[in-house]
Amino acid sequence: MRDLTGGADRVEASGRTVRQVIESLDAAHPGIKSRLVEDDRLKPSIGVAVDGVVSRLGLRQPVGESSEVHFLPAVSGGTSRAIGLRDRPGRSS
């Protein structure tokens, strides 16, 4: 989103929830909201972390006065079953 922030990799915004932070960001850097929000929710391809903790509350996530908010591309893939030591070549259980 650096193309919207004049190249800045960090910007400041106000708000007590992620929703309010996005509104503040969009007022200062038009176009940010449309990249992050769809149908009044974070886009499925976007995750948000507040103070290093990935949120499951999305736009409703509370934000502190000095919190750091990071918008992340969602990551998917992998396997749904855990792999134990016996499944690794060269290891025995």
Image: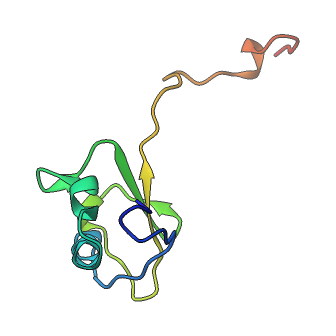
Q: Is residue 82 left or right of residue 28?
A: right
Q: Position of residue 79 (x, y in %)?
A: 52, 22
Left or right: 6 as drawn, with respect to 29: right
Label count reads 0
Q: Nearer the viewer, residue 3 or 35?
A: 3
Residue 39 position in % (x across, y down): 11, 50
**Residue sitting farthest toward the bottom:** 65
Quadrant location of the N terminus? bottom left
Q: Quadrant of residue 54?
A: bottom left
Image quarter of residue 69: bottom left
Q: Identify the residue shown where x is 29% and y is 59%.
A: 57
- Quadrant where the C terminus sits is top right
Residue drawn at (65%, 21%), measured in percent from left and top? 83
Residue 13 point in image, percent of width and height: 35, 82
Q: How is the image coloured?
A: rainbow
Taking the view exactly as shown, the residue that stands out farthest to the left is 39
Residue 31 lies in quadrant: bottom left
Q: Nearer the viewer, residue 28 or 6?
A: 6
Residue occupying image coordinates x 82% and y 10% = 89
Residue at 24 percent of width and 72 percent of height: 26
User: Relative to 64, is 90 above or below?
Assistant: above
Using the image, determine if residue 13 lies above or below residue 91.
Answer: below
Q: Is residue 11 above or below residue 79?
A: below
Image coordinates of residue 33 in percent, x first then y, are 23, 62
